[in-house]
Image: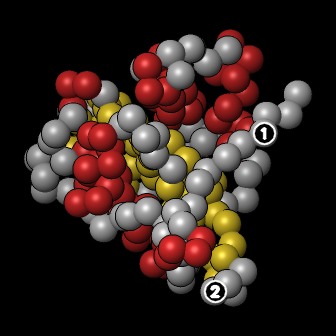
Amino acid sequence: MSYYYSVMNELQITRVDYLDPQQGKDLVTLLNAYALDPLGGDTPLSDEVKQALPAKLAEVDGANSFIAYVNDQPVGLLNAFMGFSTFNAAPLINIHDVYVAPQARGKGVVDALFAAIEAVANELNCCKITLEVLEANGVAQSAYKRLGYKGYDLGELGGEALFWQKKLS
């Protein structure tokens, strides 16, 4: 499924078919570029991850990925996964990765990628879309705020939600 946007005549957002070799290659290329970015960890994906990722994503129920193409060149990626809100007894979508290549930044790519995942969330009757953003990534925070996202705050007693992790071997 492709979505077309008039932000730039040459911008196309494509829902990734993980089993399509070219789309799988484009997904890995963009995710590796994100991993190499200082805000992505500054470390390339391992060869094993590069090889396995598209097929592994194809096995994940609720995985949703979109690639932004400009003039048929991949310039943006959004990976998201289905979850469930117990407080709303409804599905949700969590945006896990967002990356836009430097040459395409500021040209509406993020807006188009988010419009695509929001369309999926609406089709699936999701109650919300969640995402994580690094404290130091002010550019992303500004974009997300402009698109209507904000911190999850439970008031004075609970404060703002924190996203933590524990890596397993």
Mark 1 neighbour class, 10 Å CA radius: few under 14, some 14 to 19, many 20 or more? few
Image quadrant where residue 46 sits = top right
Name the foreground residue: 168 vs 109: 168
| Residue 80 or residue 57, whichever sits in front | 80
Res 85 → quadrant: bottom right
Residue 88's disc number: 2
The answer to whether any part of residue 119 appears in the image is yes
Q: Check disc 2 and report its element: helix, strand or loop.
A: loop
Residue type of the residue flagged with mark 2:
Asn
Residue situated in front as seen by the camera: 19 or 127: 127
Residue at 61% across, 18% down: 45
- Residue type of the residue flagged with mark 1: Lys
Of labels 1 and 2, the one closer to you: 1
Say left or right for 30 vs 164. Answer: left
In the image: residue 155, left or right of residue 85: left
Kindly identify the residue that appears in the image at 26 percent across and 51 percent down. 143
Identify the element where label 1 is drawn.
Answer: loop
Q: Which x, y percent locates residue 58?
A: 69, 46
**Residue at image location 73% in from the left, 52% down from the top:** 60
Name the image colouring. secondary structure
**Quadrant assignment for the C terminus:** top right
Identify the residue shown where x is 13% and y is 52%: 7
| Residue where numbered disc 1 is placed | 166
Q: For the residue carrying disc 2, how many other residues have a C-alpha within 10 Å: few (<14), some (14-19), or many (20+)?
A: few
What separation in Å lies between label 1 and label 2 (alpha carbons)?
A: 26 Å
Mark 1 vs mark 2: which is more N-terminal? Answer: 2
| Quadrant of the drawing holding the N terminus | bottom left
Disc ID at residue 86: none
Q: In the orientation shown, which residue stands out farthest toward the right?
A: 169
